[in-house]
Image (tube, rainbow, N blue to C red):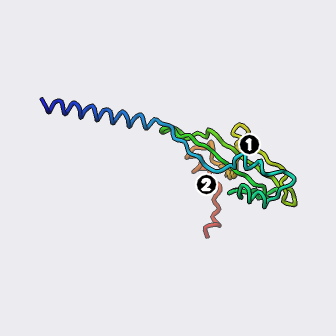
Amino acid sequence: MFGTEFSLKAAFMVVGLALMTAVSGCTALYQNHGYVPPEEDLQQLVPGVDTRATVDDVIGAPSAAGLLSGGDYYYVRSRVKTYGMLRPEVVDRQVLAISFDGQGVIANIERFGLRDGHPVALSRRVTDSSVSGKGFLQQILGNFGNLNPADFF
């Protein structure tokens, strides 16, 4: 009698543990990437007055600066949601852009969100394939006219 009661409790514990594991696997995970300074720190910066050195002192230099247009500063923060085995989804993105004029004085401070963004291809290298639409035999037989015996000797 004691053995049956013990095995019943053990079975309930195993089922409970399996159920808790399954439920915890369905929990969404959030990851934060990057840094955008808080609004309180940005209030200390005045466009047309403060310089690049002031920005470095107040909020720090960003990890990404523009190579063109005078080296503007870009602060980027993203929040990514991962749910089980599904593809990760960006749920929030903020971009703070601080542009400078020729003398290094702040010209503009702009903040963009996820809704303001557009997909941008940073690098795209595409090689045109001449074999699209051709079958295997067409590719093999198409090379016979292109051979020049002088190239072999």
Q: Is residue 35 left or right of residue 47?
A: left
Residue at 48%, 39% in the rendered image: 85
Residue 45, image x and y in percent?
A: 79, 51
Amino acid marked by disc 2: Phe
- Element at badge 2? helix
Disc 1 target residue: 112
| Residue 73 position by quadrant | bottom right
| Residue 117 position by quadrant | top right
Disc 2 target residue: 144
Q: Quadrant of the N terminus?
A: top left
Residue 65, image x and y in percent?
A: 73, 57
Amino acid marked by disc 1: Phe
Q: Earlier in the sequence, mark 2 or mark 1?
A: 1
Q: Is residue 108 left or right of residue 143?
A: right
> Which is in the foreground here, disc 2 or disc 1?
1
**View extreme (bottom): residue:** 153
- Element at badge 1? strand
What separation in Å lies between label 2 and label 1 (alpha carbons)? Answer: 57 Å
Residue at 87%, 53% in the rendered image: 48
